[in-house]
Image (cartoon, grey):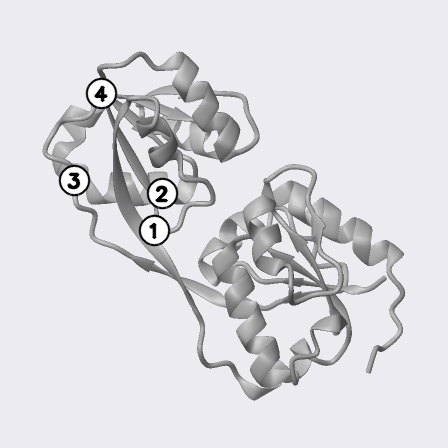
Amino acid sequence: MKRIIWTRPAEDWAQDQKIVKLDLPVLRFPVTKQVCIAPQLPPKPCDIVVLTSRKAAEGFLHQTTSIRDQLQKAEFVTFGMETYKFLVSQNLKVRLIPVHNGKDFANALVHEVKKGPVIWFPRPAEPAFAIGDYLRTHDLEIHDIEMYRTEGIKHFEHDALKRLSSEPSVVCLASPSTVKAFVDVIRTSDDARFYRYTPVVIGSTTFMASQGYFPDVFQAAHPTLQSLWDKALEIARHEPTLNKD
């Protein structure tokens, strides 16, 4: 089977290693890193806290210990089971909305949340779907709180770059920022030979960011890491492993 390149940040490996099977031909090659942002909390206390990832949940609770009594009164709403379990473990009031992606989550919130409550949304600087903007178009009061941003890694070890370009591969791309960072690496370190890489992307936004660089782009069935890995594995098992030099 063809090799799979996993590009998610090293900070996410504790979660990712539950999905990625290292007994298969896999190269871990993070092309981005996460930089924490000191959150600017809204002046209005929250009634609801919306969260779309465990990472954002952990960072938010770590940065808001001084208002933990206030947060105990709020309702936390998420759609990810990992995030849900984590919030429950923190003895918070949590509601799980059973959907698969941010867009469906936003649609569900519009139907389930009445106008009036103040909503806080701790999130990455570049969310996969602009939930805050979407809810505001439906007259809900939501305050975005940036928790971290993703930056491309600029310097790599020579041996790591040599391994990267050693053979054609299926590459997993989980965000538009990852696409940009990976494209920059291939331009500078593999003579822009994009045809040697077959991207599998996590969603439509990442799909659009990948078009124009690669001959073929495949999208996961669902915008989840498990679905991303499953699709990459499917492609890797069916694609020929011949060198394309």
**Residue type indicated by callout 2:** Ala
Compared across the picture, whether 241 is left or right of 146 comes to right
Q: Is residue 130 above or below residue 87?
A: below
Q: Are marks 2 and 1 in contact (CB under 8 Å)?
A: no
Q: Which residue is mark 3?
A: 41
Q: Tally the marks.
A: 4
- How many angstroms separate mark 2 from mark 4 (CA)? 18 Å
**Residue type indicated by callout 1:** Ala
Q: Nearer the viewer, mark 2 or mark 1?
A: 1
Q: Which residue is mark 1?
A: 125
- How many angstroms separate mark 3 from mark 4 (CA)? 14 Å
- How many angstroms separate mark 1 from mark 3 (CA)? 15 Å
Q: Which residue is mark 4?
A: 47
Q: Which mark is residue 56?
A: 2
Task: Place residue 72 in its image quadrant.
Answer: top left
Compared across the picture, whether 176 is left or right of 72 comes to right
Viewer-closest of 40 and 53: 40
Looking at the image, is mark 3 or mark 4 earlier in the sequence? 3
